Image (cartoon, rainbow, N blue to C red):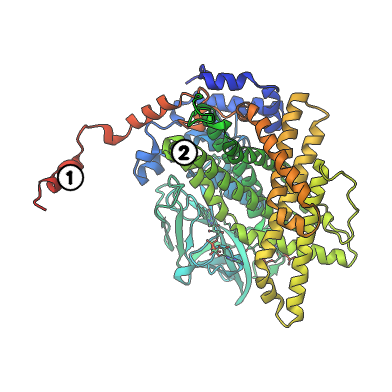
Amino acid sequence: MSVVVPECCDDLKRERGRCLFNKEELTNILDGGPKLTEKRRRIEKMLINTPELFDDVSPDYLSHEDRYSNELRKATQLMTTLEKNGFTYNDAVTTGTGLWLLMDGNPLSLHISMFLDTIKGQSNPQQLQEWLPLAEKFKIIGTYAQTELGHGTFVRGLETTATYDSTTKEFVLHSPTITATKWWPGALGKTSNHAVVMAQLYLGGKCYGPHIFMVQLRDLETHRTLPGIVVGEIGPRLGMNSNDNGFLQFNHHRIPLTNMFMKHSQVTEDGKYVKPLHSKLSYGTMVQTRVGIVYHASRELSRALIIAIRYSAVRHQSEMVPGDPEPQILDYQTQQYKLLPHLASFFALRFSARALLEVFIGTSAGLGSGKMNMLPELHALSSGLKAVATNDAVKGTDICRLACGGHGYLSSSNLPRIYTAIAAGITYEGENTVLFLQVARYLIKSFRASSQGQTLPFSVSYLRVQPPSSHAPLMSDRGLVDALGAGVRWMVGEAERRLQQLVDSGHSPHAAWNACSVHLVQCADAHTRYYICEQFVDAVSKLGETVSSGVHEVLRQLCRLYILHRVIQTAGILLRCGAVDGKALTSIEEEECHLLATLRIQAVSIVDAIDIKDVFLKSTLGAWDGNVYQRIYEEAQKSPLNKSDVTQGYYQYLRPLMKANL
Ligand SMILES: CCCCC/C=C\C/C=C\C/C=C\C/C=C\C/C=C\CCCCC(=O)SCCNC(=O)CCNC(=O)[C@H](O)C(C)(C)COP(=O)(O)OP(=O)(O)OC[C@H]1O[C@@H](n2cnc3c(N)ncnc32)[C@H](O)[C@@H]1OP(=O)(O)O
Ligand SMILES: Cc1cc2nc3c(=O)[nH]c(=O)nc-3n(C[C@H](O)[C@H](O)[C@H](O)COP(=O)(O)OP(=O)(O)OC[C@H]3O[C@@H](n4cnc5c(N)ncnc54)[C@H](O)[C@@H]3O)c2cc1C
């Protein structure tokens, strides 16, 4: 297969003719620079020229087992293709290109993400030397086995035990109850021969809490399950059915002492415990994955937006003016209102993901030299951004589907698959409400620390009790972001007041926390969105010095739309705290409608600049050429039900019913 850019339909030609900015420049910004665009395209070209990486038959028509095998075929082919051409699995992850090809979850995704990240982040030097080359060369295949039937969120409540036996220098892994069964890990059912397993560490009868262990599950030659281990697949799910999410039980299964990950905490041969520098360092892989998920969510949302916006420019329906030709549905203001704020969200998330990655890199470097002080802020930022990014990507993807009317419901639009895959992101890697409550904990602590005169870290410094007053005019971007900040400060202050009032009236702090938790989650959500607005404004203003005026104008408009939309969503709070008044809100609403019409003109060009090729979009509605109806029709012809004019079901059921004397 080679990259051929087809001629597009007249509607899309007209849309593209209106482009007032340099698309390539915007593509480079989204990729993180021209070199990264070039690298991504090199990988894509190589993938497109590897026919084995594509589906012969739509996975929708395959059995569960065949879907799994088909995905495994593509995932392994992807790894060998990358390797042969001088790339690594990491290139496929960081450029997103691997995810474009592999559908909804794939049997190697946990290996190349959480399994390898745990080896890199939790091993001591000897373990790193032993395991990393094996895992990087796929000599061992692994997953991250933490969640159990009984507990996912509450990691301290896990029941799997790892009891040290100093006589043999081994840990005995055991699942004492049905609820201790590991449940959910991707690729655990049939693919993995190893797993990093979270289990409660027991030394001399005392529990030291959850720790991570490297456990071999299957024989490396025969792939048969080892004695003392029960492992299998958990059955069909809402989506991601090409993966083999699994279950796992241990029956007094023994592993060597050296299989406990010992970078941060250690157990000596005689069974003594050496504490880590910070008790949550063993949660590091989760934090790292949350950072990755922010990128992942923004990528999935961008796919849905490309599909829905191109389709909206091709689809004509109804009459706007009686007797006139049917307009493109993108001309309806309500359609613009459905799609364009989500387009702005995609850009906001992309810039925030980049800012979060920098915090992650900085914090990790600090940890290397024993500095733990940035960990709480990284935990709060990664938790909040993971939650907002997945919530917004899921909502935005579903709006994209709805905005495509009936055809958005077709599998061949690819919108249902994008939706079910990203919907899992709300739950996995920390359920979003739970993560918001972690953020809220950080906000309340910070607010209280500020009341006691302490200096706050950068992401919460705006919460200080006496903030400097904003000098920016209210209706400027900065002025509106300051107003949003004032709203969050008011919300957090109000939450703190309510918590204190409940405690003063005799409630325990924990009961007070639960009684305020709806409000606390709203605080965490609002704080994270304030952070996103700040990152967006900062990024656009920094880029202003280096990019062409056309690109800067588009980014400025998207940023403005994101902020205006956010102010309208938060109107109730902003009015209550006096950050805006009714008159300002009216003019903000009017400006938003005006901006929708302005952005609509270049909407197709903006999604073109995201630069996802048809083979990766996999959508009848979103292809570059806009040849929607022909593609939908051709896809329908592939339905196995169309192989014969009269189906077996007719002879078996329908005909007997029609012939029966009812
Ligand atoms: C061939 C393939 C090519 C294609 C590529 C394919 C894909 C992958 C590519 C890359 C990855 C990138 C993107 C991902 C994309 C797709 C997804 C892929 C895989 C993901 C699958 C999902 C896997 C999982 O779900 S694994 C299981 C995850 N489980 C969880 O997240 C559990 C959530 N629960 C918790 O984290 C904790 O229990 C808790 C809720 C945080 C509570 O912890 P607890 O110990 O009880 O602590 P407590 O509340 O008492 O707080 C005490 C104190 O500690 C602080 N704290 C808590 N956690 C942390 C932390 N992590 N760091 C720092 N500090 C922490 C907390 O704030 C408290 O502080 P304080 O007392 O208030 O000061
Ligand atoms: C597709 C998919 C893939 C997965 N892959 C993996 C994997 O590879 N490895 C792995 O180990 N796990 C994996 N998981 C498991 C996943 O990490 C957990 O499902 C997730 O952490 C949520 O935990 P839970 O299922 O126990 O939900 P629960 O915690 O039972 O959540 C149920 C409800 O209770 C609420 N709730 C729970 N605790 C609190 C609280 N403290 N305060 C307020 N509300 C609360 C939640 O908000 C939610 O509404 C996967 C899950 C899915 C769906």
Q: Is residue 310 left or right of residue 466?
A: left
Q: Where in the figure is residue 311, as x and y percent of width and height?
A: 51, 30
Pointer 1 or 2: first along the chain: 2
Q: Residue at x 61, y 46 (%)?
A: 132
Residue type highlighted by circle 1: Leu
Residue type, mark 2 in image: Gly
Residue 18 visible in this rendered orientation of the protein: yes
Q: Which element carries disc 1, helix, strand or loop?
A: helix
* The residue at label 1 has a CB less than 8 Å from ligand 2: no
Question: Of all residues shown, which one is farthest toward the top?
Answer: 7
Circle 1 sits on which residue?
Answer: 654
Q: Position of residue 376 (x, y in %)?
A: 75, 58
Some atom of ligand 2 lies within 8 Å of the CB belonging to the residue at label 2: no
- Residue drawn where x is 36% and y is 45% of the image: 65
Determine whether 547 is above or below 6 in the image: below
Residue placed farthest to the left in the image? 661
Residue sitting nearer the eye, 423 or 325? 325
Left or right, 520 with reference to 329: right
Mark 2 Cα shell of 10 Å, populated few (<14), some (14-19), many (≥20): few
Q: Crowding at label 1, few (<14), some or many (≥20) Cα neighbours within 10 Å?
A: few
Q: What residue did someone put label 2 on?
A: 405
Q: Which residue appears at 76% of the width and 55% of the height?
A: 574
Give x and y (percent) for residue 552: 76, 29
Residue sitting nearer the eye, 573 or 544: 573
Query: Where is residue 134, by image quadrant?
Result: top right
* Looking at the image, residue 175 lies above or below residue 29: below
**Image quadrant, ligand 2:** bottom right
Foreground label between 1 and 2:
2
Q: Is residue 358 visible?
A: no
